[in-house]
Image: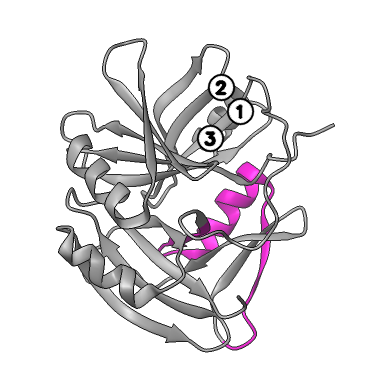
Amino acid sequence: MANPNTGRFVWHELVTTDAAAATKFYTGLFGWTVQENPMPGGGVYRMFSQGEVMVGGAMSAPSGVPSGWLLYVGVEDVDASAKRIGELGGKIMVPPTTVPDMLRFACGMDPQGAAFGILKGIGPGSDKPPYEGRARPGTFCWDELHTRDTAAAKQFYGGIFGWTGKAGEHDEYWHWQNAGKEIGGMTSHMGGPGVPPHWLAYIAVSDVDAVTKKVETLGGRVMVPAMEIPQVGRFSVVEDPTGAVFAPFRSAHV
């Protein structure tokens, strides 16, 4: 029986040029707590939690790598999926690697250059079904691909993860589906000239305007001011002090 997390976004990881500054920012913005864990090869891996819910992780960026949030998708076989990424025109940036008693993962890029990771848990609770309830403030709630070639992206991600999807009723926004459930989106709007293809992670909040304002007081930058999407919700796009971009969001259905 397939793991219920297969084909779903299962982890969000902040790769940052300044872990101390990023930690101060996110704990101040969302009230996240942090647990520091030594890494086998040296350094520290930080685990962010919102109350009892583990939200994501953070690690120092390798030299020359800019800050950003990396999204991981659950797979049944990391090695086979990594091979498939290459066969479909993508690139593997971090080859399949095992974290003992926890997980096996790899990181890559799609043919247009958007980075993402793949992951299979091998520790206790790795087959626990994903949370299906209403998004809790301070947790990731949506993941969205920004790409210049949506047709190629459909073929690539469908070939890797078996994703399907459908366009919105009133626009060309694409809704990714995995096993019949909506898991994320895709758009050809890149967010400005010179912006490369990328995945954008959304974090649920109770007040988008207040959070967006607080981003600036904590040293971040507002890239897209708070705005409303009728019948969808309110969001903004912001950047943390180290350059990682994400989107605060409040659904119209809460």
Q: Secondary structure at mark 1?
A: strand
In the rendered structure, are the residues bearing label 3 and label 1 in contact, judged by CB atoms less than 8 Å apart? yes
x 56%, y 50%: residue: 156
In the rendered structure, are the residues bearing label 1 and label 2 in contact, judged by CB atoms less than 8 Å apart? yes
Q: Residues within 10 Å of mark 1 (few under 14, many from 20)?
A: many
Q: Quadrant of the N terminus?
A: top right
Question: For the residues marked 3 and 2, what is the alpha-carbon distance in whole angstroms?
Answer: 10 Å
Q: Quadrant of residue 60?
A: top left
* Residue 194 visible, this orientation: no
Q: Is residue 193 left or right of residue 87?
A: left
Question: For the residues marked 3 and 1, what is the alpha-carbon distance in whole angstroms?
Answer: 7 Å
Extreme residue toward the right, this view: 1
Q: Residues within 10 Å of mark 3 (few under 14, many from 20)?
A: many
Q: Position of residue 105 (x, y in %)?
A: 51, 26
- Three-letter amino acid code at disc 3? Ile
Q: Give the magenta part as a residue range.
A: 141-170
61 is higher (above) or lower (below) than 101: below
- Three-letter amino acid code at disc 2? Leu
x 16%, y 64%: residue: 217
Label ID, residue 192 = none
Label ID, residue 120 = 1
Label ID, residue 103 = 2
Does 8 lie within the magenta span? no
Q: Residues within 10 Å of mark 2 (few under 14, many from 20)?
A: some
Q: Is residue 164 left or right of residue 93?
A: right
**Disc 3 designates what residue?**
118
Does 146 lie within the magenta span? yes
x 20%, y 52%: residue: 243
x 18%, y 58%: residue: 218
202 is higher (above) or lower (below) than 251: above
